[in-house]
């Protein structure tokens, strides 16, 4: 879902420049983008179907590497077909390895230029595979600032190869000054079964806390909305609705996914970050901001929501410089 949400500013900018766009995705991400852009063409790509059942990143990726490789080749075949069918002039791929074409300028977007894996051999092999795919593209776009301050840290600084361009953080959020009506908003996202595990833990603990709490499940399959005591639960919110909910909350509770961090960087919200077990990248980012006194980090195995809501008051939140790079880059690229 994070890859879909950070693509929203790019899609809006391209439409604002007067160009047509074809949107390709799968699952909940595709459902979200259909709701955000109902008038555009939407096509289904093969699903990577990544799951994080283990807290060991190497085990997670070893079992899923064949599936990821197959999906990358399958989506590459889809892209070749769509280029012919829709006369595509440019391709922008958010972390989908196979979405390039040898005759069409293709741009790969990621904040993970340098995978952080503890085991040396696994790290070497993983980064070699990462570079193999990225080098198939005309350019690699990093949604972050090139210098300091930045969000991604060692994941993309310094750039380890030459076709990298830093395009600035991407977010669909805007800071708003509105009355606070929630003690906290919980935003769930990420792969199963960990998303469901976290929903169960936080739903149970939230009901014993004084103050209104909103829980957004991040499930776009069907709309549900219920309220029990202090806990209001909703299946999903549009970008506008989620923006308002965050600005109306004293604290945000979420995974430490990169797209979430980009959203938080423009809002200045206090946040409790709970990394997805087995996602080394999320653990590194959450730990970094925790140590800097910016966001509070708790592990999924040791969540104490009541204590965290007290401790988070001592953390300052994050406000990054405004990003004005994206529209200039797209304008130059598309000839506007």
Image (spheres, grey):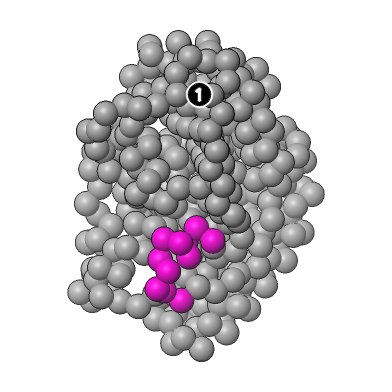
Q: Visible in this render: residue 139?
A: no
Mark 1 Cα within 10 Å, few/some/many (few <14, many 20+)?
Answer: some
Nearest to the observer: residue 195 or residue 287: 195
Q: Is residue 9 left or right of residue 23?
A: left
Can see residue 245?
yes
Residue 293, picture quadrant: top left
Q: Is residue 272 above or below residue 165?
A: above
Residue 271 in percent (x, y) is at: 43, 26
Q: What percent of the width, then of the height, locates residue 109?
A: 45, 57
Q: Position of residue 31 (x, y in %)?
A: 54, 61
What residue is disc 1 on? 230
Quadrant the C terminus occupies: bottom left
Apparent side of residue 203 relative to residue 262 in the rendered image (left or right): right
The stretch of residues the image draws in magenta is: 31-41
SS class, disc 1: loop
Residue 74 versus residue 126: which sits nearer the camera?
74
Q: Is residue 52 magenta?
A: no
Q: What residue do we see at 61% from left, 27% from top?
A: 203
Indicate left or right for 205 with 254 as reference: right
Residue 146 drawn above or below residue 277: below
Tell me the residue at 46%/86% (across/down): 86
How far across and down, in percent of the image, does residue 277 sit? Answer: 66, 32
User: Which one is nearer the viewer's eye here, 244 or 228?
Assistant: 228
Q: Residue at x 65, y 68 (%)?
A: 46
Q: How many marks?
A: 1
Residue 38 is one of the magenta-drawn residues: yes
Above-or-below relation of 286 to 10: above
Q: Determine the residue positioned at 67% across, 38% down.
A: 196
């Amino acid at each position: 879902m994070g890859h879909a949400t950070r693509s929203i500013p790019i899609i809006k900018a391209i439409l604002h420049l007067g160009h047509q766009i074809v949107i390709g995705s799968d699952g909940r991400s595709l459902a979200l983008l259909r709701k955000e852009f109902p008038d555009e063409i939407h096509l289904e790509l093969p699903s990577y179907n990544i799951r994080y059942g283990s807290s060991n990143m190497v085990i997670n990726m070893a079992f899923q590497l064949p599936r990821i490789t197959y999906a990358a080749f399958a989506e590459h075949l889809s892209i070749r077909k769509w280029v012919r069918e829709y006369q595509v002039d440019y391709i922008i791929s958010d972390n989908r390895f196979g979405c390039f074409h040898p005759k069409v300028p293709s741009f790969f977007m990621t904040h993970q230029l340098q995978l952080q894996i503890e085991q040396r051999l696994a790290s070497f092999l993983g980064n070699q595979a990462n570079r193999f795919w990225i080098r198939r593209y005309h350019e690699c776009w990093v949604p972050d600032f090139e210098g300091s301050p930045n969000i991604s840290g060692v994941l993309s600084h310094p750039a380890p190869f030459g076709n990298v361009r830093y395009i600035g953080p991407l977010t669909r959020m805007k800071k708003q000054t509105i009355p606070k009506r929630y003690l906290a908003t919980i935003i769930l996202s990420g792969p199963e079964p960990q998303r469901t595990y976290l929903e169960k833990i936080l739903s149970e603990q939230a009901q014993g806390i004084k103050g209104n709490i909103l829980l957004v499940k991040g499930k776009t399959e069907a709309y549900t909305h219920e309220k029990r005591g202090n806990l209001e639960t909703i299946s999903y919110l549009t970008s506008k609705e989620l923006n308002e909910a965050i600005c109306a909350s004293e604290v945000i509770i979420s995974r430490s996914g990169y797209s979430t961090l980009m959203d938080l960087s423009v809002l200045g919200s206090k946040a409790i970050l709970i990394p997805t077990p087995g996602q080394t990248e999320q653990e590194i980012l959450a730990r970094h901001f925790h140590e800097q006194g910016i966001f509070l980090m708790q592990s999924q195995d040791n969540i104490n929501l009541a204590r965290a809501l007290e401790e988070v008051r001592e953390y300052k939140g994050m406000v990054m410089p405004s990003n004005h790079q994206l529209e200039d880059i797209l304008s130059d690229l598309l000839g506007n």
